[in-house]
Image: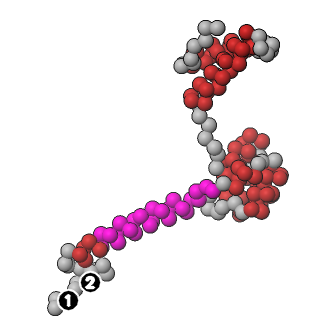
């Protein structure tokens, strides 16, 4: 059979050409077996070479808009202008009612739209909490070394 692993893009291209030549071979024949093995090797190479990450709900909506020629206005017709803007800017999560409307109108699987996804404010909120914690820890250390309390006031001797 003389089949080798696919390690490079040139190997991949050659395997695809051979698959094209073998296409339609009878199942169970030596050509059909070769086609099956090559297809499995090509699939493994493509998965490794070009991994596909799942889209979050906003990315899925944007992909559907791009692939089907839809606009923000089309989304706004389904869920309202301000909500469409807030969803696409990640300022508001999708509600169940929005998910059902989008899934039905655009024939998208609801499971794609139901997933949790990060909102724009969450990233800012995490940074703010971290900054406050750092400042609070710094104040606490200042009070622990004898000079100031956590509020910044001097302690009375006594």
On the image, numbered disc 2 is attached to which residue? 153
Residue 9 belongs to the span the image colors magenta: no
User: With respect to residue 125, does 36 lie above or below?
Assistant: above
* Region rendered in magenta: 116-139
Residue at the (70%, 44%) spot, across then down: 63
Name the spot of residue 51 as percent of width and height, x first. Answer: 59, 34
Name the spot of residue 147 as percent of width and height, x first. Answer: 20, 78
User: With respect to residue 136, does 67 lie above or below?
Assistant: above
Q: Residue furthest front?
A: 28
Report the front residue among 95 and 66.
95
Q: Main secondary structure of the magenta part?
A: helix
Q: So how many labels did they put on this image?
A: 2
Residue at the (72%, 42%) spot, across then down: 66
User: With respect to residue 15, does 53 lie above or below?
Assistant: below
The quadrant holding residue 87 is bottom right
Quadrant location, the C terminus: bottom left
Which one is closest to the eye, mark 1 or mark 2?
1
In three-dimensional space, the C-alpha distance between marks 1 and 2, rounded to whole angstroms, equals: 9 Å
Residue at the (24%, 79%) spot, across then down: 148
Q: In the rendered view, does 139 fall on the left or right side of 63?
A: left
Numbered circle sitting on residue 156: 1
Residue at the (39%, 65%) spot, across then down: 131
Q: Residues within 10 Å of mark 2 (few under 14, many from 20)?
A: few
Q: Is residue 74 visible?
A: no
Q: Is residue 2 visible?
A: yes
Q: Secondary structure at mark 1?
A: loop
Q: In the rendered view, does 118 fall on the left or right side of 105?
A: left
Q: In the rendered view, does 76 fall on the left or right side of 130?
A: right
Q: Residue furthest left?
A: 158
């Amino acid at each position: 059979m003389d089949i080798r692993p696919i390690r490079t893009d040139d190997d991949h291209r050659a395997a695809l050409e051979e698959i094209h030549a073998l296409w339609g071979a009878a199942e169970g024949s030596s050509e059909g077996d070769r086609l099956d093995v090559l297809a499995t090797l090509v699939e493994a190479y493509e998965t490794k070479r070009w991994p596909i990450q799942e889209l979050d709900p906003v990315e899925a909506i944007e992909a559907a808009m791009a692939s089907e020629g839809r606009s923000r206005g089309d989304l706004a017709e389904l869920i309202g202008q301000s909500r469409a803007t807030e969803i696409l800017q990640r300022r508001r999560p999708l509600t169940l009612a929005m998910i059902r409307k989008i899934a039905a109108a655009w024939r998208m699987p609801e499971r794609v739209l139901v997933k949790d996804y990060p909102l724009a404010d969450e990233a800012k909120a995490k940074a703010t909490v971290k900054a406050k914690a750092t400042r609070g820890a710094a104040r606490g250390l200042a009070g622990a070394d004898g000079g100031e309390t956590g509020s910044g006031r001097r302690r009375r001797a006594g």
